[in-house]
Amino acid sequence: MSVGIRHDDLRRRNRAMVISAVRRAGQPSRTEIAATTGLSHSTISAISADLIQEDILTESKASEPTALKRGRPQIGLALNPEAAAVLTVVLSLNFLSVAVIDYAGQVVAEEQQRLDTLVMPRDDLIGECMAIVRRRLRDPDLDVGSVARIAMGIQGITDSHSRAMLWSPITPLTDIPFADLLEREFGIPATMENDCNMMAVALQWRDPERYRDDFIAILLSHGIGMGLVLKGTLFTGTHSSGGEFGHMIHRPGGALCRCGRRGCVEAYAGNYAIWRSAMKMSEDAEPVDVGDADMRALAAKAREKDGPEREAYRRAGEALGFGLGSLFALIDPAPVAMVGVSAAAFDLIEPALQEAIAQTAGGQHSESISFDTEPNELPLIREGCAARALTFVDQEIFAPGVQARAGAGKNVA
Amino acid sequence: MSVGIRHDDLRRRNRAMVISAVRRAGQPSRTEIAATTGLSHSTISAISADLIQEDILTESKASEPTALKRGRPQIGLALNPEAAAVLTVVLSLNFLSVAVIDYAGQVVAEEQQRLDTLVMPRDDLIGECMAIVRRRLRDPDLDVGSVARIAMGIQGITDSHSRAMLWSPITPLTDIPFADLLEREFGIPATMENDCNMMAVALQWRDPERYRDDFIAILLSHGIGMGLVLKGTLFTGTHSSGGEFGHMIHRPGGALCRCGRRGCVEAYAGNYAIWRSAMKMSEDAEPVDVGDADMRALAAKAREKDGPEREAYRRAGEALGFGLGSLFALIDPAPVAMVGVSAAAFDLIEPALQEAIAQTAGGQHSESISFDTEPNELPLIREGCAARALTFVDQEIFAPGVQARAGAGKNVA
DNA sequence: GTCATTTTTTTCGACACCCGCAATAAATAA
DNA sequence: TTATTTATTGCGGGTGTCGAAAAAAATGAC
């Protein structure tokens, strides 16, 4: 509210808007862009001429056979894949993966690697991350100069400025400033993103119709995480990545959570909690990591016959339902995407979850609630990182403010 | 994201910004405005010349003795009180109040009235509201043409577009479209605002230093309500006024709440809940309305000696603490203002509240949490309504978009 | 008391941006 | 081949902001 609009900001913003219109719509014509943005044809024409001249956009002449209409055919505008590239790094439990993505959003190279994140010393963990990025950047097929942004995603809590990992379940290490480390090492601007936030960004990117203004992505895995989009924008906390849905209190003084506190939603619905309950262990038992295969076996057993396994999923559903109910009391109901290995067992979870929600204020607008499931979180996290990085390039590099272009990217001016 | 910036929007926005700078700063000089907005002196000069010419701003020459500096003295700019007026209506339990406020924010007239909201039929309730507004508008001292906006505040749930009361604890009636009724009756644009949201707006208006980006206003009264400001803007739900903190679940299946569900925070911390607990009534007992005087007596007794009264406040504090803890897990800790009659008993509530928060994820950044108390909610609600209405006039009437000025307000054009 | 200095505000010329309208381009239908 | 339709571009005009210089209004020094 406190800063005015300068004359030169105008072009910057409208440039950014044309780019974003092209990214969203695929191959829109100038006329379509003019219609969606409300700007005049002349303006769109001028801006797109600039962008084509700068090799950011290309004209994709012969696209579809739209020949059904009379009149001059529309010329589709597309993102030039070679305008820039971004690199994504996803670090999860015992697994590290990297991908290089062109400006049009296509994966052009990738590499994956297993590693023992839980026991690696600090320098080794950082070293492996740097090494895999370095290998990809040295790829002779890749023009290194075009890599304009690195986005790293990690399971755990990051700071609110997307610079550092503060805490993670995949390693006992804390406070690793990955973004700064990557920037210093490779001279490319980088960010450190939270896994659940990237899941939410990816859902919006994949299906902007379904996931538009308000929705929730919940990770059901070792821990319980959440990415929250409100009014079309990702919600992040003021101190940290925010949205620690898993640590809302389900039962004051209740079951022991991995975070050391008691009664969190996660202490009933995290993998370890379901396992603990199914094995009839005490609610005070120390949380242990349970493999995905074990969880799938557990779900199979729960489906087979009634017993402690089924009861464990029931209790998880109850905790999630009351948690969602409280959340919905605050932000109003919204579609929910359940992601992660326990999302594959959502059939076991859902009945108790629905029953619990119905007992809360969130149950009022239950027609606004829908559940999607997606068992595999890693592709979503990577897509989210790619979306983040590309959006940054769109806005900050190809539509920069007064301060001259940062100099990254081969096709820039 | 989808709409472009036109060339004429520029002036509109910068006009709005100059007005808002003057409203915030009191009597800033053109130079100060240029500094805070980042626009050039020439631009500020041109815009303020327009605004003065249109009688929206005035030059307040001889203000303070700033004669300590050399050079041409600054000329303060001030809002012209006669540029417009707004009217606020606050409807609360058994009480209706109206105020007329000039463009500079000063109350120029007010009227208050007792009425039995709990038992009034629909037509009577609406009729009394219309009548009191009509009386104020007929005041010969008031230029009716200058009343540019009506903002009505009510205890209860309103719709997300600020048009109607959906539900309220002060009346069994539901779904009264007050905003539309007022507009139709008086031909003045109107809104229907939620009480707790207005409390939050008022806090920001009163002390923008302390209540700036993120903070929470909680009403501790018959019910428990919340107004939430995130990243500097009021948070509202997608369906309703949002932020039903009082109906987050504290204990699944627990005490009976006024909303008919069980275990809500309000069922432990609302006036009726504290009363019920202090009187050793069952948690299933029907909620009853307790007068403010009775609540003050109860608090006095609790301060006097340990007993069921003190225990009741302790349990209220526990519920509020766990609720805040869950809230803070989602949005990160922020300053809290406790408002309402039970805020005067916050000394009895706070120990258990702090203890509970410490057991939650919200306890991590406890240094970010602070508590203010304000026992009287009505003045805050009125101020919030006034702020809302004046901001509307600033932005929509005195800095309108392409569509010509709406014609309200005598000094326009 | 006059003049230099300092600070604020206004004025003026230049430039950039967007818009509307007319012109041009490229297709189909007659 | 020509008329029609639709998309895109070119041009002139209007408006908004900026920077620099001028004007205004005070204080301080001699």
Image: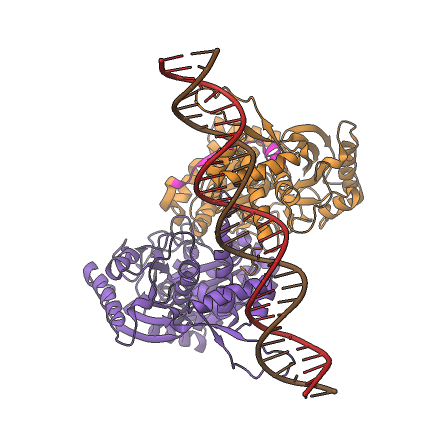
Chain colours: A purple, B orange, C brown, D red
Check the picture and name the quadrant holding the C terminus of chain A: bottom left
Location of residue A147 with respect to B173 vertically, above or below: below
- Asked if residue B381 is among those painted magenta in the image, a careful observer would answer yes
The span picked out in magenta is: B368-383
A371 left or right, relative to A71: left
Asked which quadrant contains residue B288, the reply is: top right
In the image shown, does A248 or B400 lie closer to the viewer?
B400
Location of residue A179 with respect to B324 vertically, above or below: below
- Asked if residue B159 is among those painted magenta in the image, a careful observer would answer no
* Residue B399 makes an appearance in the image: yes
Q: Position of residue B97 (x, y in %)?
A: 70, 33
In the image shown, does A271 or B285 lie closer to the viewer?
A271
Q: Position of residue A102 (x, y in %)?
A: 38, 72
Asked which quadrant contains residue A42, the reply is: bottom right
Q: Position of residue B77 (x, y in %)?
A: 56, 31
Location of residue B95 with respect to A270 vertically, above or below: above
Residue occupying image coordinates x 58% and y 49%: B256
* Residue B278 makes an appearance in the image: no
In the image shown, does B39 or A141 lie closer to the viewer?
B39
Residue occupying image coordinates x 71% and y 30%: B112
Residue occupying image coordinates x 76% and y 36%: B145
Looking at the rendered structure, the number of numbered marks drawn on it comes to 0
Asked which quadrant contains residue A407, the reply is: bottom left
